[in-house]
Amino acid sequence: MSIPLQHLTVLGSTGSVGLSTLDVVARHPERYRVHALSAHSQLDKLVEQCLQHRPRYAVLADPARLPVLRERLQSAGLAEVETLAGLEALEYIASHPDIDTVMAAIVGSAGMRPTLAAARAGKRVLLANKETLVMAGRLFMDAVREGGATLLPIDSEHNAIYQCLPQPFSNGAAQGVQRILLTASGGPFRGFSPAQLAAVTPEQAVKHPNWSMGRKISVDSASLMNKGLEVIEARWLFDLPPDRISVVVHPQSVVHSMVEYIDGSVLAQLGNPDMRTPIAYGLAWPERIDAGVSTLDLFQIARLDFEQPDTDCFPCLDLAFEALRLGGAAPAVLNAANEEVVGAFLDGKAGFVDIAKVNAATMRQVAVDFDANSLESLTAADAAARRFAASWLARSGH
Ligand code: NAD
Ligand code: MG
């Protein structure tokens, strides 16, 4: 029996998840055809990907860079690749009638509208861009339902949970799910004292012990904000209240997460820390395909450790639970503040410990008065949070 070809758009194809996606896709040319690629700044990488995958569209976020892209594609002999730019172009390739599947791998809130467009158009949405769910969880899940989309989580923890849940999954409590246990590596600063944390640099923060990822999510992993964003992501993906979501520090990053059932069973998904596993799962679901990932060697791993998270040193995790309690636009505000302060930290304009301070101050100050059921209002909340965070940093002498 021949396998129907899946036509793909990869949003954020030049990033860490984008590269891993194209790696899996290239292993299965009989299954996948790349229809559109999108990038932000790395034009050379985008042109190289166009040479390999021959998409119909190459799309940039910033229209000002379009002439350079056109010229480079022409000189690479790729004049037939259509070039587009801007948010509407990203929405266009995410909802194009000729595609089946969208890999949503843009980093940050910039990914929200294109991901929403894919959901509304009823695509198979491979969701890496967790910020979409953090900002607009309810709106996004409604769009998935109303658009008839198939949503497959790519974040390794949520992918693991998805694999451990009863299928079809509809209602956790009715299906015997007691709790989900999100695992966290603890990041590069696990066990650090507050004094040590005050002195850490961006270079140290982006060196994750187990995973190779983009810079923003690496800093989020170091501050535990990433785990906080994942708690919010899990709340929406699996429709569970926050008191049924727990975080377990597991430094080896081999158990990618677990589901605890009322009968005492705990199901876990294990594997090497390589995003190609969840990506291949999302691409092929409900089938399984080779992801190019080496087999787990349990004898080499030898032991698995589990600890409580240190929320005194890493308060961002608790901030996420607080955002869920506050409800409304609080998660969107927290997310925007975090994007601002992490950007400042990476640029050497804020200290590592400022991340939690800015996030807390912004969420408590800005989160009221915004309606979480309107995209315009969420966008306004995002902008207000960024302004507040920037002024906090300016006031504190950064
Ligand atoms: P990355 O920084 O490596 O790549 C980001 C991609 O987004 C790049 O292709 C970049 O060109 C594009 N981009 C950046 N800013 C943009 C903008 N303003 N408009 C349009 N495109 C823009 O990031 P990543 O590590 O691949 O992460 C991507 C997403 O996946 C994030 O939301 C992250 O939280 C999530 N995620 C990543 C991993 C991982 O292992 N890297 C794991 C789980 C979840
Ligand atoms: Mg994750």
Image (tube, rainbow, N blue to C red):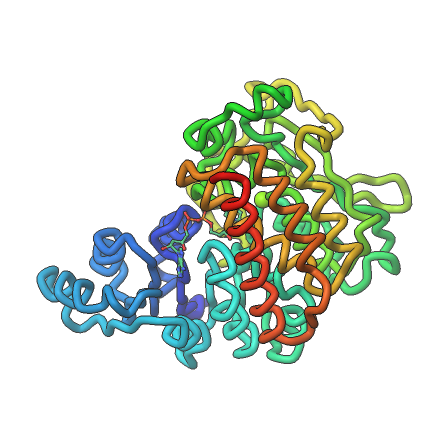
Determine whether, in the image, residue 184 is placed left or right of residue 76: right
Residue 238, image quadrant? bottom right
Q: Position of residue 221 (x, y in %)?
A: 56, 38
Q: Position of residue 206 (x, y in %)?
A: 45, 34
The one of 140 and 283 positioned closer to us in this rendering = 140
Q: Position of residue 213 (x, y in %)?
A: 45, 41
In the rendered image of this protein, does residue 1 appear above or below residue 217? Answer: below
Residue 173 appears in the picture as rendered:
yes
The one of 313 and 98 positioned closer to us in this rendering = 313
Q: Position of residue 142 (x, y in %)?
A: 67, 74
Q: Residue at x 21, y 52 (%)?
A: 44
Determine whether, in the image, residue 347 is placed left or right of residue 306: left
Q: Residue at x 44, y 70 (%)?
A: 4
Determine whether, in the image, residue 136 is placed left or right of residue 112: right
Q: Residue at x 80, y 51 (%)?
A: 242
Task: Please tell me in which quarter of the rendered image ligand 2 is found.
Answer: top right
In the rendered image of this protein, does residue 304 appear above or below residue 9? Answer: above
In the rendered image of this protein, does residue 377 appear above or below residue 42? Answer: below
Residue 286 appears in the picture as rendered:
no
